[in-house]
Every structure is written in C-alpha cells, then in structure tokens.
Image (cartoon, rainbow, N blue to C red):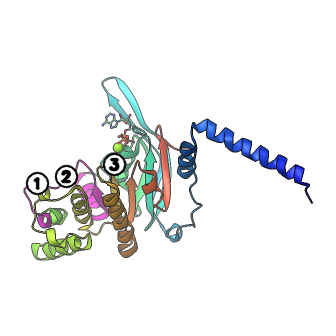
Amino acid sequence: MIQTGGQQHEQLSSTDQKIQEFIQAFGSTDAAISAIKHFSTKPKAPSIYANNPVIMQVKDITRTYKIHRQKVEALRGVSLEVHTGEFVALTGASGSGKSTLLQLIGGLDQPTSGSITINGTDIQRLRDKKLSEFRNQTIGFVFQFFYLQPFLSLRTNVEVPGMFRHVPRKNRSPRAKELLERVGLSEYVDRLPKELSGGQIQRAAIARALLNEPKILLADEPTGNLDKRNSEEVIKLFQTIRKELGTTVIIVTHNPEIAAQADREIQLSDGVIV
Ligand SMILES: Nc1ncnc2c1ncn2[C@@H]1O[C@H](COP(=O)(O)OP(=O)(O)OP(=O)(O)O)[C@@H](O)[C@H]1O
Ligand SMILES: [Mg+2]
C-alpha cells in the first residue's frame, strides 16, 4: 500500500510517542537503554549438547526445612532434565532455593519428596558409604564452604579427593600438577592458598573438583567474589572443561551476563522454576 507523507508522519509521531513513554517509565534514557540490554537476550541457537543423553533427571522435588516449629519450603516441586555436556546456569533471587537444589543434586542432602536420578542411579537409594562413593566418583564440587586447606600446597590440595579414593600418590601427584597447569596455575603448584589471588584460588578449587574426573561439576557462585576479568576467566574455564572433557557443568550465579554464557538458564523463584 502506498502511503502519503502525512500518514507516514503520523505513524512516526506515534512511534516517537511510544518511545518517549517507554523512556519516561524508566526515568531516563540511560535507564531505558540498560533495561533493554538487560532484557533483550539474543535467541540462542539450540545447544549441540541438548541432543546428548540425559545425565540428570530431577522429578518434582520438594525440600522443607524445619527450624524450631516453623517450616521453610525451600523447594516446592522442581523438575528438570540436564543432558551430558550441557552448561546450565541456575539463577534467582536470594533465598529462592538455588543452593538447596545444588546440594540435593550433589547428594549432600535428601529431598523431602520427589526423585533425583543421576547417570542412571536413583540417588535416594544410596546410603552412607555408597552415597559418598557415588559423590566422589560422579560429582565435582566447587562450593564456598568447601575451602582449600590453608596449610597444604596447591598440589596437595588438588590431590585430596584422590586420597579419599585411595588413588596411589604416584598417580595422584602428576594428575594434580597437570590439572593445575590446565587451569593456568603451573607456576603455583607449591604455593599455599594464602599466597594466591581470589581468582587463582577459585581456579585451584576447580582443578581439585576435576581430580576424580567427575561427570558433573557443580559450582555455587564460583565468581561471587571475583572481579570482571577473573569471573570471565573462570567461566571460560568451565566452557573449556565441558568441551574438552565432556563434563556437565551446573553453576549458580546472580550475574545475568554470566548466565547468558551458559547453554541454558534455569531461574528459580520462591522454590519453583519460572
Ligand atoms: N539449613 C537450613 N535450615 C533452614 N532453612 C534453610 C536452610 N538452608 C536454607 N534455608 C532456607 O531455604 C530457603 C532457600 O535457601 P537457599 O540457600 O537455597 O537460597 P539461595 O537461592 O541459594 O540464596 P542465596 O542467593 O542467598 O545464596 C531460604 O529461605 C533459606 O532461609
Ligand atoms: Mg545460595
């Protein structure tokens, strides 16, 4: 349809008006632009990993904590599937249940109801020794409460998960060194954790989590205390690990830029996926 100049002008004015209203709603042009940047996530190409077999299946899990006589429903029916080699970011406000979910997936805690199957094993059926064996063989943890030992060198720290599996020292030690090289810490193998930066400590914790060649790497806010450059290095490292070792990576993060680099973002709100 051929439009007259007048009609075009009218259309432009109404568009301009909408833009003005949009900017006004955010208070300033800068605020509106940063909101657009924040919300406009590019449609992602489907991840090549999405066709891989399912390595983890979470079915309708709940977790209710009881403190004194009160009940806290941290998770209220969460279901998800993760494929081998996927890089998944768990996001959501503080208290939404992210760490609770990660601990359940890692077999560090039991759900109140529902089931978690990892690598074909229903992990609720495992008890004590079998459960710790399973964790040790299948899951690598990068959790903030699981610090490096301050009096052990980086190399010995990285060897620790192998000690629990009774891997002989002659095998453990070169593997620890190799992993520290892989995470860019070859010059630091004999240092103590206190002689390192936050980013280096975090990379050493990742090397330690990889010692037993876990199928799944779980990290709770691995970039929480890091600046932009160190955060980017840690995320790049996760990308390399899953590409080169085929490890499935699940991280919790508050940072939308980091979540955008994962294959998939799963957002929790008040104990449910949204
Ligand atoms: N051991 C516990 N005992 C009682 N309540 C708990 C326990 N752990 C977590 N909660 C509660 O469960 C809810 C979810 O906590 P969770 O730690 O999973 O949140 P989160 O999303 O990891 O938050 P954050 O971003 O602050 O780390 C919160 O209301 C929290 O207070
Ligand atoms: Mg948390």
Q: Residue at x 10, y 72 (%)?
A: 169
Is ligand 1 closer than 8 angstroms to the Cβ of mark 3? yes
**Residue 196 shows up from this direction:** yes
Q: For numbered disc 1, what is the local secondary structure?
A: loop
**Residue designated by label 1:** 150
Q: Distance between the residues labelled 1 and 3?
A: 24 Å
Is ligand 2 closer than 8 angstroms to the Cβ of mark 1? no
At label 3, which amino acid type do we have?
Gln
Name the mark on residue 147: 2
- Density class for disc 1 (Cα within 10 Å; few <14, some 14-19, many ≥20) is few
**Residue designated by label 3:** 103
Number of the front mark, 3 or 2 = 2
Number of the front mark, 1 or 3 = 1
Residue in front for this viewpoint, 81 or 200 = 200
- Density class for disc 2 (Cα within 10 Å; few <14, some 14-19, many ≥20) is few
Residue 52 percent across, percent down from the top left: 49, 70
Quadrant showing the N terminus: bottom right
Residue 158 percent across, percent down from the top left: 18, 65
Q: Residue 213: name its quadrant.
A: bottom left
Q: For numbered disc 2, what is the local secondary structure?
A: loop
At label 1, which amino acid type do we have?
Pro
Indicate which disc, 1 or 3, sits on the residue closer to the N terminus: 3
Q: Residue at x 39, y 62 (%)?
A: 249
Quadrant showing the C terminus: top right
Q: Is residue 272 above or below residue 46?
A: above
Q: In this view, does 19 lie to the left or right of 81?
A: right
Start-end of magenta stretch = 128-156
Residue in front for this viewpoint, 55 or 201 = 201
Pointers 2 and 1 in contact (C-beta within 8 Å) = yes
Residue in front for this viewpoint, 209 or 257 = 257
